[in-house]
Image: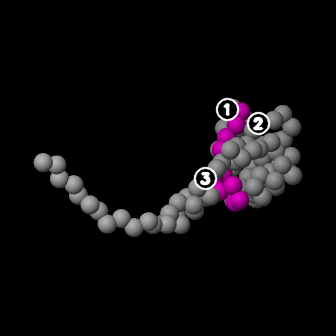
Amino acid sequence: MKSFIIYNHKEQESPEFDLEVKSSRLHEIILYNDDVNTFDHVIRTLIEVCEHTPEQAEQCSLIVHYKGKCSVKSGTYDELEPKCIRLHAAGLSAEIV
């Protein structure tokens, strides 16, 4: 003889946090090397735009120089977009991924 279990199931709405998790997915600003900007300019810009400490900005500039690129800031797309625009305005090559 087979037995069946009956569950009282009510239709539930999707939790609101599911939508929030999707919309707040983290992105990164990737800074690329170029032959135009000086280390000092890159460091100053990272301090101003990305709120880096001087040490952090110097490390990122060295990584960009030797590796060709470096992630310089992470956050939501909406947080990063104005920062990436400011990096472009300063003559740096960067993108949000």
Quarter of the C terminus within the rendering: top right
Q: Position of residue 61 (x, y in %)?
A: 71, 42
Q: Residue at x 84, y 34 (%)?
A: 35
User: In the rendered structure, does residue 76 fall within the stretch colored magenta?
Assistant: yes
Residue type (three-letter) at the residue carrying disc 1:
Lys
Q: CA distance from mark 1 to mark 2?
A: 8 Å
In the displayed structure, does residue 53 sit left or right of residue 93? Answer: left
The residue beneath circle 3 is: 26
* Callout 3–callout 1 Cβ contact below 8 Å: no
Q: Which residue is mark 1?
A: 67
Q: Which of 21 and 78 lies nearest the eye of the viewer?
A: 21
Left-right relation of 43 to 27 = right
Visible in this render: residue 21?
yes
Residue 47 seen by the camera: no
In front here: 19 or 28? Answer: 19
Question: Could you tell which of marks 3 and 2 lies nearer the N-terminus?
Answer: 3
Q: Residues within 10 Å of mark 1 (few under 14, many from 20)?
A: few
Question: Considering the numbered disc 3 on the image, is that residue within a helix, a strand or a loop?
Answer: loop
Residue visible at 78% across and 58% down in the picture: 82
**Residue 58 magenta:** no
Mark nearer the viewer, 3 or 2? 3
Element type at mark 1: helix
84 or 1: nearer the eye?
1
Amino acid type shown at disc 2: Asn
C-alpha distance separating marks 3 and 1? 23 Å
Dot 2 corresponds to which residue?
Answer: 33
Marks 1 & 2, CB-CB < 8 Å contact = yes
Q: Residue 53, position in %: x, y?
A: 65, 56
Front tag of 3 and 1: 3
Residue 83: x %, y % from top left = 76, 56
